[in-house]
Image (cartoon, rainbow, N blue to C red):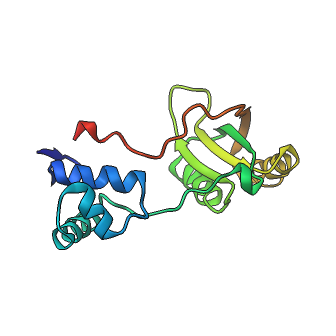
Amino acid sequence: MSKNTDSLVTIDRTDRQILEHLQHDGSLTNQQLAEKVGLSPSPCSRRVKALEEAGIILRRVTLLDRKKLGLSLTVILQIGMDRHTPERFQQFEDKIATYPEVQELYLITGQQADYLLKVVVPDMDHYQSFLLNKVTRIPGVSGVHSSFVMRRVIDNTELPLGYL
């Protein structure tokens, strides 16, 4: 057993197996999951519910194929801010969170930029519109550097649970 120090929840081997299987396929029924981890359905369901209540399982999602939906351009943006104040950062974060094109947003250090964003759009024309009509109009944005993803080498949503 290991302890998750953030939530102080004990994770045993069975919990870890449950998490691994759900990360890989969130559509598993409780019956299927129970069979995979060697439990009967009732205890398996109780464990999943406990993992949800502990905040370890945040939500279940369906992953979509970007290219098949015509969202073939992924852009990594580095954003510089004019002032480093909590209010300025919060204003930026609140505004950028309203844009569905933004898949990930990180406040970073060790770079010229303050923020790193992953953006998904159909093509360069849509990216130009997103950049000029949305991002650069947010108060405080002082610089933008765009990098275009040529190919996804690793695109994984599963967390490494071997450390538990």
In the foreground, 107 or 53: 53
- How many dots with numbers? 0
Using the rendered view, name the quadrant where residue 49 is placed.
bottom left
Residue drawn 56% across and 41% down?
Answer: 84
* Residue 57 position within the rendered picture, expressed as x and y whole percent measured from the top left: 33, 60
Residue drawn 49% across and 62% down?
Answer: 61
In the foreground, 17 or 52: 17
In the foreground, 20 or 95: 20
Horizontally, residue 117 falls left or right of residue 30, namely right
What residue occupies the far bottom of the structure in this picture?
42
| Image: 124 above or below 69 | above
Residue 109 in view: yes
* Residue 26 position within the rendered picture, expressed as x and y whole percent measured from the top left: 42, 60
| Image: 3 above or below 112 | below
Placement of the C terminus among the 4 image quadrants: top left
What residue occupies the far right of the structure in this picture?
125
Horizontally, residue 86 falls left or right of residue 103, namely left
Residue 8 in view: no
Residue drawn 34% across and 53% down?
Answer: 21
Placement of the N terminus among the 4 image quadrants: top left
* Residue 86 position within the rendered picture, expressed as x and y whole percent measured from the top left: 51, 50
In the foreground, 74 or 80: 74
Using the rendered view, name the quadrant where residue 99 is placed.
bottom right
Residue drawn 84% across and 51% down?
Answer: 126
What residue occupies the far left of the structure in this picture?
1
Horizontally, residue 58 falls left or right of residue 18, namely right
| Image: 126 above or below 94 | above
* Residue 104 position within the rendered picture, expressed as x and y whole percent measured from the top left: 57, 48
| Image: 99 above or below 127 | below
